[in-house]
Image (cartoon, rainbow, N blue to C red):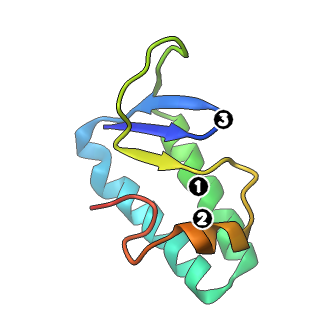
Amino acid sequence: MIVRIMGEGQWRLADEKLDQLNAVDTDLEKAVSAGDEAGFKTAFAALLEFVRAGDKLPDDELHDSDAILPPGDSTLGEMRELISGDGLIAG
């Protein structure tokens, strides 16, 4: 699975990490839905950290992304506009 963080690049995550990634994404979705600013910041930081723990792809190597995450400085309001009923990560 390839995940892009806008403004940072792409990371490759092992397919078996999808369930863990979805769990972190669910925490983010719950915080955003509740309007919980502190919970949002914690959950979004955890999601970005999880992705960044994968294998960073070289910047000159472009792949289709399976998921695209907003930049790390995104606000709760911006995230509310981006999250669908499935969170940021489909699946």
Nearer the observer, 40 or 61: 61
Q: What numbered label is drawn on residue 46?
A: 1
User: In this picture, is 30 found above or below 15?
Assistant: below
Closest to the camera, between mark 2 and mark 3, is 3
Q: Position of residue 79 (x, y in %)?
A: 63, 67
Q: What residue appears at the point 35 percent right and 55 percent down from the top-left corner?
A: 20
Instruction: Decide which of tag 1 and tag 3 comes sooner along the chain.
Output: 3
Image-quadrant location for residue 77: bottom right
* Total number of numbered discs in the rendering: 3
The amino acid type of the residue labelled 3 equals Gly
Q: Position of residue 50 (x, y in %)?
A: 50, 45
Mark 1 element type = helix
| Residue at mark 2 to residue at mark 3: CA–CA distance | 19 Å
Asked if marks 2 and 1 touch (Cβ < 8 Å), the reply is yes
| Residue at mark 2 to residue at mark 1: CA–CA distance | 5 Å
Asked if marks 2 and 3 touch (Cβ < 8 Å), the reply is no
Residue, disc 2: 43
The amino acid type of the residue labelled 2 equals Ala
Q: Position of residue 54 (x, y in %)?
A: 45, 32
Residue, disc 3: 7
